[in-house]
Image (cartoon, helix red, strand yellow):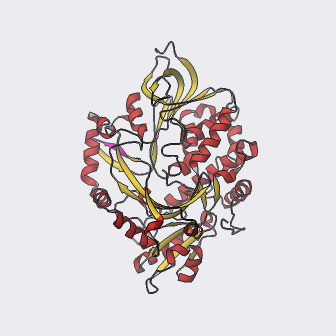
């Protein structure tokens, strides 16, 4: 189908995960007249990175993730990244609270619940680090209410599984934020999509794999897609704006677009394995997320954690993930994804990263050769009394780390997420992984600022945006009063704990 024969829409979003549905939700709130289409290669929404069993993004607010608070050369702890992630999660909370009040989210407990977040370390050196980390974080209003203890009895109350059976003479320390949450982003994606379907001008197509992406003379984009799977859909459309939120496949689609801003980008895929426990008597003892320290050179999503998870109403514990290597860019991807992504422009950056990322390569090599018994022994470092018969292996979601060109053929491996867009604002792609889903609202707002800045003015979208995000334009890292008010307000609507309530999950 040629571009002249194809249907024209205002917005096309590639990928039916939490990123696309969040951006579509914002756009629908700001301009109900927009026509919006989501295209997804799989048979349903949220089956890849947003699926609850695939992702590790379960309410990240940087409360417990120690990789966000590195130790400086002078021994101080840098909390800048943690603060950024922390207030980005506030934007998600404000969006969800708005949708609850608007009736688009009937029951917030379907996807979010209070779950304390703990950081836990063993050994004198790590205890000293955590003590400094606590001092730096607890002095800032964004982390008000953080607790700290080196008392094994107190830590055992917070997280019984990590202390039962542990040697009494080993130094331990932990922090706790009772206002942490567990979020099922797969369920949330379905809720957002249902709300979008209830309004005119929205369509979502499944089994529709985008295989053509080119810009038309008028600046719009021709998006061609073919059937993927037994019940797929083929067709084409023209879109005035395209968002590529396809997880690991975003790199391939960015390359298809041919925009010069994407030149030189590459991707390094990392696979993973969870250990999962569904045994009721074990799960009942662990209503917390416990994060440890990352191994040297490991990627952010590989930070070891013993996680309470509630997915589709089912309570489980996940431990891991154990990292590995696969050339696939998606869990349901192709073994040829990595080699087919190679271009003359990104070979240099990828080689440069390969030469200078020995720590990551060493870490992945160690992880790949781990046996089932070795993985279980790692679990026992967190949960000393774990029984092997209670745990089984589950494949985690695939993540593609960004290889960013630095000029003159060089490149750098970049953790986190990045928006790469056309200069005219007509197309933008979301690259990368963690913290991902937890900052979906912040990513959507960045997309709006980059691609729809002409509409974010007082006589157009800005008043509506401030109705959705009341603190838009306010720096919650600086304005303590606004931060406190926002958190108290959204906690009440979402039915989650506040500092005042100090009420962990039932």
- The answer to whether residue 446 is visible is no
Extreme residue in the front direction: 389
The span picked out in magenta is: 402-409
Quadrant, the C terminus? bottom right
Question: 53 and 352: which one is in front?
Answer: 53
Taking the spot 33% from the left edge, 42% from the top edge, the residue there is 405
Membership of 301 in magenta stretch: no
Judged left or right of residue 239, residue 460 is: right
Q: Give the camera-side residue of 31 and 306.
A: 306
Q: Image height check: is 462 above or below 175?
A: above
* Residue 465 on image: x %, y %: 67, 40
Q: Is residue 314 above or below residue 170?
A: above
**Left or right of residue 93: residue 418:** left
Q: Residue 265, how many percent across, how many down?
A: 35, 39
Residue 498 is situated, as x and y percent measured from the top left of the image, at 69, 64
Q: Say which residue appears at 31% left-offset and 37% top-offset.
A: 336
């Amino acid at each position: 189908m040629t571009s002249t024969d194809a249907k024209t829409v205002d917005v096309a979003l590639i990928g039916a995960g939490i990123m696309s549905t969040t951006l579509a939700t914002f756009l629908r709130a700001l301009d109900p007249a927009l026509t919006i289409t989501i295209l997804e290669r799989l048979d349903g929404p949220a089956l890849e990175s947003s699926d609850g069993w695939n992702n590790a993004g379960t309410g990240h607010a940087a409360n417990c993730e120690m990789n966000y608070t590195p130790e400086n050369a002078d021994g101080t702890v840098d909390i800048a990244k943690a603060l950024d992630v922390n207030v980005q999660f506030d934007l998600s909370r404000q969006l969800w609270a708005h949708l609850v009040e608007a009736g688009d989210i009937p029951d917030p407990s379907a996807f979010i619940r209070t779950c304390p977040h703990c950081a836990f370390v063993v050994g004198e050196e790590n205890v000293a680090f955590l003590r400094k980390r606590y001092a730096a974080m607890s002095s800032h209003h964004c982390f008000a209410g953080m607790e700290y203890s080196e008392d094994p009895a107190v830590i055992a109350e917070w997280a019984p599984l990590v202390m039962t059976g542990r040697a009494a003479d080993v130094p331990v320390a932990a922090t706790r934020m009772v206002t942490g949450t567990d979020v099922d982003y797969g369920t949330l994606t379905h809720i957002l999509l249902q709300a979008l379907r209830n309004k005119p001008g929205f369509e979502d197509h499944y089994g529709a794999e985008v295989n053509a992406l080119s810009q038309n003379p008028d600046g719009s984009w021709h998006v061609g897609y073919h059937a993927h799977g037994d019940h797929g859909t083929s067709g084409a459309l023209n879109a005035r704006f395209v968002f590529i939120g396809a997880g690991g496949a975003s790199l391939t689609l960015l390359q298809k677009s041919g925009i010069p801003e994407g030149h030189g980008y590459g991707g390094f895929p990392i696979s993973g394995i969870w250990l999962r426990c569904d045994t009721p008597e074990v799960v009942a003892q662990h209503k917390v997320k416990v994060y440890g320290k990352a191994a040297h050179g490991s990627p952010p999503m590989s930070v070891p954690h013993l996680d309470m998870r509630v997915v589709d109403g089912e309570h489980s514990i996940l431990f891991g993930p154990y990292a590995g290597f696969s050339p696939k860019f998606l869990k349901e991807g192709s073994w040829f994804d990595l080699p087919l992504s190679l271009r003359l422009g990104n070979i240099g950056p990828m080689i440069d990263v390969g030469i200078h990322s020995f720590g990551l390569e060493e870490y992945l090599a160690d992880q790949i050769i781990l046996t089932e018994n070795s993985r279980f022994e790692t679990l026992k470092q967190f949960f000393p009394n774990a029984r092997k018969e209670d745990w089984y292996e589950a494949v985690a979601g695939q993540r593609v780390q960004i290889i960013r060109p630095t000029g003159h053929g060089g490149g750098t491996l970049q953790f986190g997420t990045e928006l790469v867009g056309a200069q005219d604002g007509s197309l933008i792609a979301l690259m990368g992984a963690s913290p991902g889903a937890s900052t979906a609202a912040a990513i959507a707002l960045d997309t709006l600022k980059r691609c729809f800045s002409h509409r974010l003015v007082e006589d157009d979208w800005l008043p509506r945006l401030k109705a959705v995000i009341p603190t838009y334009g306010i720096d919650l890292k600086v304005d303590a009063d606004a931060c406190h008010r926002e958190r108290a307000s959204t906690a009440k609507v979402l039915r989650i704990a506040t500092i005042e309530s100090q009420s962990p999950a039932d």
